[in-house]
Image (cartoon, grey):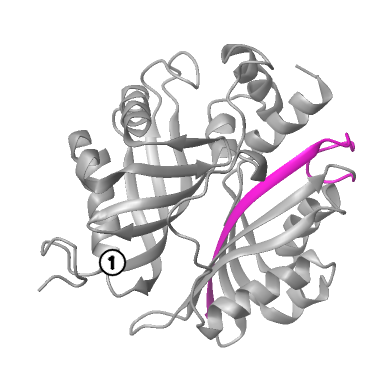
Amino acid sequence: MPFLPGFDERWRDAPDYVLGITKDIWEDRRIDLLHDYYAPSLIVRSPASVVEGNDGIIAATQATLAEFPDRELFGEDVIWCPTEFDSFLSSHRLYCTATHEGPGMYGAPTGKRLEYRILADCWCKGNAVQDEWLVRDQGAIVRQMGHDVVDWTRDLIAREGGPERCVAPYTPANDVAGPYDGRGNDDEWGHTLADLLTRIMGAELAVIGKHYDRAAELAYPGHQMGVGPGDADRFWLGLRAALPSARFSIDHHIGMQEPLNAPRAAVRWSLTGRHDGWGRFGAPTGAEVHVMGITHAEFGPRGLRREWTLFDETAIWKQILLATGDV
């Protein structure tokens, strides 16, 4: 019997499925299997765009592999929960390595060696991914190639045809309703992380010192690493200070407890509103901005001991540049 009705017997469990199909597609070059692993009507929302249907995903996969032919995706974790008797929602974290050897969306080949993370939520049913939310650390990729993030984003807008024709970043206005509308599970650790982020975004920054381990390991956009409550405070304050009036929303949360692992949680969240403060994105511009973020965390005896948070800096700057006309 498969681990879930409707899934192939090859897969032992949800993590085996998610990490297995990732390796099949990207490292074993079975791009053709996207016809099986991704539903024909799949919707992939990333901060950079909304992609509907399998054909666009196959084309994008081929383009990425042509630009980064030695790309490897190491599965660090899969946090998941059943949703119905024959489906599940996974939030997986990948550590990616690649060499920029071909031309593509990042420009002419640079030969640069890259390391960055991806966090993605996938709803899976019938042996296929049906709905997806994905955040790639574009800021890390751009910087490791030697570019300034703002200048690169401005150039991307031009290469895509200018402000009127460029690819629109993902916002609530251009979202597409998919088959999954759940909010996660009721595990206490998902609620713990969601509550912690909500309080931080509500300006209760003191909770960081109270609930983060003094030696907490932190990984943030731009492949930035940190240690302890001080670095966490600087990261979250820099984001919130840039968007002080934006509405913070917990869009999905999963908590998970299993043998041989610390309690863990995955939260997908968003900030929607005006860039009306000084902070991570420079002088206030008044631009309307939508930030889609995903956070993974592990908890220990002294509080939150590991955190991974991602949002796409280039998608935020693209919204700012388009709104201000600074292109």
Considering every residue shown, the one lying at the far bottom of the view is 301
Kind of element beneath mark 1: helix
Which residue is located at x 84 percent, y 37 percent?
A: 282
Q: Nearer the viewer, residue 98 or 35?
A: 35
* Residue 124 image position (x, y, % from top left): 33, 59
Vertical comparison of 38 with 113: above or below: below
Disc 1 residue type?
Ala
Which residue is located at x 31 percent, y 31 percent?
A: 58
Q: Nearer the viewer, residue 257 or 96?
A: 257
* Residue 159 image position (x, y, % from top left): 57, 12
Which residue is located at x 72 percent, y 53 percent?
A: 271
Which residue is located at x 35 percent, y 52 percent?
A: 130
Vertical comparison of 14 with 126: above or below: below
Quadrant of res 302: bottom right
Label 1, residues with CA under 10 Å away: few <14, some 14-19, many ≥20 = many
* Residue 106 image position (x, y, % from top left): 50, 22
- Drawn side of residue 143 relative to residue 112, left or right: right
Tell me the quarter of the image containing the N terminus. Answer: bottom left
- Drawn side of residue 184 relative to residue 100, left or right: right
Residue 280: within the magenta? yes
Q: Nearer the viewer, residue 76 or 53?
A: 53
- Drawn side of residue 24 relative to residue 91, left or right: left
Q: Nearer the viewer, residue 90 or 214?
A: 90
* Residue 94 image position (x, y, % from top left): 40, 52
Vertical comparison of 250 with 31: above or below: below
List the residue tagged with mark 1.
Answer: 14
* Residue 27 seen anywhere in this rendered image of the structure: no
Residue 83: within the magenta? no
Tell me the quarter of the image containing the C terminus. Answer: top right
The boundaries of the magenta stretch are: 277-299
